[in-house]
Amino acid sequence: MERRRVVVSGMGTVNAAGCGSVDFVQSLRQGRSGIGPVSVFDTALYRTHLGGEVRDFRPGELLPRGIPRRHMSRCDLMAMVAAFEALGDAGLRPLPQALQKAMGVVIGGGAGGMLECEEVYRRWLEGKARPSFAPFASFGCAATADHLAATLGLMGPKTTFMTACSSGATAIGYACDLVRDGFAEVMLAGGAEPLCRITYSAFNALQAVDAAPCRPFDKNRQGLNLGEGAAILVLEEAGHALRRGAVIYGEVLGCGVSCDAHHMTAPDPEGGGAILAMSRALADAGVSPQQVDYINAHGTATPTNDPIETKAIKTLFGPHAVRLAVSSTKAITGHTLGAAGAIEAVVSLLAIHHRFIPPTLRHEEPDPQCDLDYVSEGARDREVDIVLSNSFAFGGNNTALLFGRYREGGHRDV
Amino acid sequence: MSDPIAISGIGIVSPLGISLASFAPRLFAGDCGIAPLTLFATGEGGPRLAAQVDGFRPQDYLRPATARRMDRLSQMVAAAARMAQDDAGLPIDAGNRDHIGVTVGTCFGGTDVAATFGKVLFDEGPRRVNPILVPNTVMNAPAGHLAIEFGVRGVNTTVNHREVAAETAIGHAAALLRRGRAAAIFSGGGDILSPFAMTVFARFAALSPGDAGEEGAFPFDRRANGLVLGEGAAILCLEPLSRARARGVRPYCLLAGCGMASAPAPATGWPTSPEGSVLAMQRALAAAGIEAAQVDVVCASANGAPALDRLEALAIAQVFAGSRPRVVAEKGALGEGLSSGATRAAAMALSLRDQRLAPVVGLSQPIADFDFVRKGDAEKRPLRYGLLNGIAAGGTFVALIFKAMEEGEGQ
């Protein structure tokens, strides 16, 4: 049986550094950071006050007229805007009726409708009023996919993954398998995450947050900045995309998923799970480590993640580790948790399509434990054919995605 | 012919008993797991029934050091996985631990922990919250804890999609195994009763009321007036048949196909059209390569919510227009366990191995003309194929097809 290949024919994103992928690519090229004061809730009582917030988010102006927004959370709406952008980008607006029945959606979630639920919950705890529980329809992560499918009339497979900070990548990997296995010709896949008080206080309590803008791989890094956003990809069977003359941003070459089985919040010091995820993505793609041009790192800027990720890359890539470029775009977007894997999939595909490597912002003082080429000087124009995107999460959940420039003959080497 | 996916072990923590040995006899006898809720106090005049898990002793299954770090849901999931591992006789060692995966479905996750965390956040402020709680507020906590408990580094995912989370996780596991992404996967799901879940469902008027009419779970019955919440966890050990066979294990049954679909639905409610459920069932049949008429038993999702039961009755009638499978609806005994698909999959696996079916508890005046399984029924036909139907509020549908082992197969 001929192997079914999966390409990305459309992308959309909303995040602190860009509303739409055209805007986002400018931020990535210019190293423009979206990190600033958080305003979606009052941070006065918190230890830190910064985040990668989507400012002036006006879904009413960004969505086509007549799209009902009732009962949708901020998270749902960011995903909705990204999905419409992705479909428009793919030349699938309006969505052909013939596609709707088999097309599905897979979302990687995080806090979902938590921001809105927090208000209700706070009032419920006060025990006074009987607040409307309507926002709880968006509790958990499923509401985003439900709203997308209902709005677009999708009747294909629909589900939601929650593997914390790797959710978005896990969702894309799963949707890719659905297309490969013939369960769908076209899928929407991505992730969405809102800033909210529960998450913000949780990361602060774990002392994982830098009060200043984060510095991935820098010697003086103090932790991450939380962010929010959404990114949606149109995944399409290659032949289907070619037949309709779609622009192809790149191919999903492979996906690797693993678990550290070490600790719920601390990474395995040997990077065992990270190595497994990366090597599985390469094996799935039949690509050798030497073919990889760029790694979009998990690079959270926490004291533990960055050296362990560096060590894992060095272990797996051997001498090639110093030749490839590694950068963390979380200094630009913040750590968008459930959305991060999807936003960074967009970064990876933009790098391939626009032939450049985005920089690691604020990487100033080298750390002897982080000794790779982190693209500190600014965006680098160069040919980029194969990109590995890492997402590591609480629970030890690791997902690595491998993307490549679309070539008729593919990239299989092994 | 590719290697079929087998269910080689089952672990269960349920309102009808902990471990298969206590669950199976009560399930097939038609016992009801629904009783007055005693885990925590319920609101005055509100619903007072639930299907709660009693007598669960995590220390019987888990190491004290790890069990201590787990929330109640993670303990249930990890304990069920330990039972499934023992049942499957699957040794886990340095040689295979990287190839053993976990896929868990949950609707609400550890909401009791999240509620505790949130209470401090809102009552005392963000600087007073307890960092120890954080890992267990996240939906993927059970899968992460389970991986640590077993030391398994294979594929590890958590599906968080309302009432079909577990069905999806099981279908996902089968697809992963077929692609060779793991050698064995512990797959299933769990949810727990909590004041949070009771409050949310009560506010949406989804529960069988405590202050009007008869409180209870009456799937497919004219008396149906809402669901009764349940809890529990079930984990299946899934692996390619050849691997189970190589260990000399005779599996319960095979997982032959999975079908998924979506259809528009109100944000908090059940879809109005049966189309999505019909599509999921038809896709599952196609994936298994069988006709509807070959299905001997359907395990329905019906939970006593009138709109869901009507919708599912229409869908089953449409898919099985030309045949008359037996119909079971276990939420009458187990309550709406949210990620109930795992427990129902365990029941289906037992049914296909033992050729027995569970009577529909809470059914006296059916709303549909199906061949429902009743107490005292003799088994009418050999059970070869079973279809498990999953429907979630918000319009998500998953159907799984299970196939009994053939004579000589898996020996």
Image: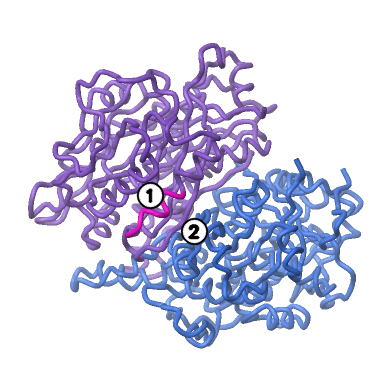
Residue at 38% x, 19% y is B382
Q: Where residue A303 sits in the image (x, y, percent)? A: 67, 61
Q: Is residue B16 above or below residue A137?
A: above
| A186 left or right, relative to B362 | right
Q: Colour of chain B?
A: purple
Q: Which region of the structure is painted magenta?
A: B272-279
Q: Which amino acid type is shown beneath numbered disc 1?
A: Ile
Q: Is residue B93 above or below residue A315?
A: above
Q: Is residue A235 above or below residue A95?
A: above
Residue wearing tag 2:
A155
Residue wearing tag 1:
B391
Quadrant of residue B96 within the rendered picture: top right
| A320 left or right, relative to B375 | right
Q: Where residue B39 sits in the image (x, y, percent)? A: 22, 43
Q: Which amino acid type is shown beneath numbered disc 2?
A: Met
Q: Nearer the viewer, residue A122 or B393?
A: B393
Q: Disc 2 on helix, strand or loop?
A: loop
Residue at 72% x, 63% y is A241
Distance from disc 2 to disc 1, alpha carbons, whole Å, reads 14 Å
Of all chains in the rendering, the one displayed in blue is A
